Image: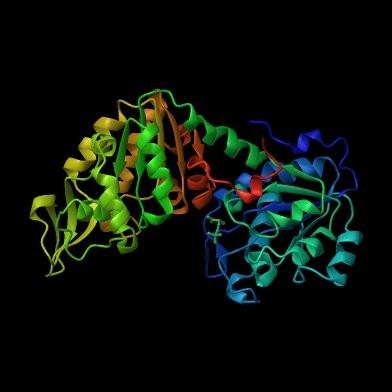
Amino acid sequence: MKIKSIRQIKSLKGKRVFLRLDLNVHIRRNEVVEMHKLRMALPIIDYLLKKEARIIIASHLGRPKGKKDDKYSMEPVVRALENLLKTKIKFSKQIIGKAVIKKSKTLKNKEIMILENLRFESGEKDNSVDFAKSLSDLADIYINDAFAVSHRAQSSVDKIKKYLPSYAGFLLEKEINNLSLAFKPKKPFLAVIGGAKISTKVKLLENLSKSANKILIGGALANTLLLAKGNEVGKSLVDKDSLSWSKKFIKQKEVKEKILLPSDFLVENSKKEVVMKKIKDVNKTDKIYDIGPDTILEFSREIKKAQTLIWNGPLGMFEKKKFKQGTMSIARSLALQSKKEAVCIVGGGETVEALSALDYKEYINWISTGGGAMLSFLAKEDMPGLKGLIK
Ligand code: 3PG
């Protein structure tokens, strides 16, 4: 895979660089609470500072509806990035227009300006040509270092490339190189897939059913597949829209051989008690919230045999303390196998959050900044943000 890298630009000195980052992070009480994406953005910013560029950073945050919404302002992100970089950063509330063009032109070399949330303008999500053109007026060069949003057809990752010489940043390059390891995996190749919605993982599951040796399933994804197989899952969360696809999928011979579904769970019963149950004992009023100890053992045994591992999506409702055991145990098994011998690639917002509490996370080879983008890339879907930047 050939990447049009920022390193190919001979001189960046004095150039206005539009740096598209994915700074879509969790904010609680006006503070950034998960720093992974911010830290991963530091190498490209440091590089541009060293090369004496003038830096215009742009990102989306959350899903505002195409108009200003203070809840989604970039201001807390600006402060967090200032702390990490130990540099003053300018903040522009205007995203496009004469005033911000002027600000971009008066930026000095090695100065940074961050624009307000791109999704405050409806043109961003509409992939509007006019909006892309207006963004391009702010810069001489465009860098995409926002892998995590590169699966979206949105102006600042897609259409803007028409109007500026465009290159990939370091993080984009690293994401591509690391995630591509899953295309030529050392065998046995094992995937752990959890989370709530099958619909976002259909293509990946179809691909994995061909390339992987084993697929371990947890979370509401497992509930849906168990229901599709005719099991009782009570009042547990299921992805109803994907039920008919699930029924066809789970019937295939190849799939049956490769997919491993949980055999026991932590469930909340009708009296709101948390109890352990085998799948055959789950009744109409139960709610499944986590995988049980037998499943943890069985999954960990499989993980210990693997040479390549990928993981996306929690295996239970890990945000609640009493249901985090399954996800954390599997995270630990993955990290330990990665420490021993396997290549391990992990991604997805909640998955990364689960990992941040784990001691051995440094053994994991790659923690992707992408959730949906990681799934798209691994499913070999066309990604608008990568178009023209990789061949
Ligand atoms: C993410 O966090 O996965 C990316 O920033 C994409 O966000 P989106 O799903 O709101 O487009």
In the rendering, at what x and y percent does residue 47 appear? 76, 40
In this view, which residue lies farthest toward the left?
Answer: 281
The image quarter in which residue 191 lies: top left
Name the quadrant of the C terminus: top right
237 over 211 or under it: above or below = below
Residue 316 visible to the viewer:
no
Residue at 87%, 35% in the rendered image: 10
Residue at 43%, 46% in the rendered image: 203
Q: Is residue 262 left or right of residue 164?
A: left
Viewer-side residue, 80 vs 106? 106
Q: Is residue 59 left or right of residue 260?
A: right
How many marks the image carries: the answer is: 0
Residue 85 visible to the viewer:
yes
Name the quadrant of the N terminus: top right
76 over 338 or under it: above or below = below
Residue at 17%, 45% in the rendered image: 263
Q: Where is ligand 1, by quadrant? A: bottom right
The image quarter in which residue 227 lies: bottom left
In the rendering, at what x and y percent does residue 129 appear? 75, 63
In the rendering, at what x and y percent does residue 261 appear? 23, 44
In the rendering, at what x and y percent does residue 252 appear? 26, 40
Q: Is residue 253 left or right of residue 56?
A: left
Residue at 81%, 58% in the rendered image: 136
Question: What's the image's color scheme?
Answer: rainbow
